[in-house]
């Protein structure tokens, strides 16, 4: 039973390390999407906003989604190069 607990602890540490990967980029993508949505709404419904501001907001949202996609691919590559090994180190 102690071996199973030790393996479980190693698995939890592995998952924590995986979740911490590229957290800054993921947060930047989220913030970019939120800012882009605000710019898009402001450009669409603002009384003095130019029409091109809407396109800027859409571009910022697209950049945020690109960051999300990059994080997904980088995490996938990390998992492929560092598979979980209960006998090894992280």
Image (cartoon, grey):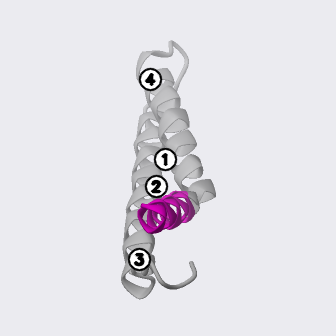
x 43%, y 16%: residue: 45
- Is 78 inside the magenta-drawn segment? no
The answer to which quarter of the image holds residue 55 is: top left
Q: Specify whether residue 23 is in view.
A: yes
Residue 60: mark: 1
Residue highlighted by disc 2: 63
Specify the quadrant that holds the C terminus. bottom right
Report crowding for label 4: few under 14, some 14 to 19, many 20 or more residues within 10 A (C-alpha): some
Tell me how far mark 2 sits from mark 3, CA to CA: 32 Å
| Residue that appears at 44% across and 77% down | 86
Q: Considering only order in the chain, which callout, 4 or 1, is on the residue closer to the N terminus?
A: 4
Q: Which residues are magenta?
A: 1-19
Which x, y percent locates residue 10? 51, 67
Residues tagged 4 and 3 counted as in contact (Cβ below 8 A): no
Residue position for label 3: 84
Residue 58 position in % (x across, y down): 40, 42
The earlier-in-sequence mark between 1 and 3 is 1
Report how far apart the C-alphas of labels 4 and 3 lie in the structure: 44 Å
Q: Secondary structure at mark 1?
A: helix
Q: Are marks 4 and 2 in contact (CB under 8 Å)?
A: no
Element at label 4: helix
Q: Find out whether the residues at labels 2 and 3 contact each other: C-beta distance under 8 Å.
A: no
Q: Which residue is the site of mark 4?
A: 41
Looking at the image, tell me whether mark 4 or mark 2 is earlier in sequence order. Answer: 4
The local crowd at label 2, few if under 14, some if 14 to 19, many if 20 or more residues have their Cα within 10 Å, is some
Which of labels 4 and 3 is toward the front? 3
Q: Say which quadrant the N terminus sits in.
A: bottom left
Furthest residue in direction top, as rendered = 47
């Amino acid at each position: 039973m102690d071996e199973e607990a030790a393996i479980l602890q190693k698995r939890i540490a592995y998952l924590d390390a995986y979740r911490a990967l590229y957290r800054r980029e993921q947060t930047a993508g989220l913030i970019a999407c939120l800012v882009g949505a605000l710019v898009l709404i402001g450009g669409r419904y603002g009384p003095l906003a130019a029409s091109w501001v809407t396109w800027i907001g859409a571009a910022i949202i697209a950049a945020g989604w690109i960051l999300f996609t990059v994080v997904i691919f980088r995490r996938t590559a990390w998992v492929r190069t560092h598979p979980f090994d209960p006998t090894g180190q992280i």
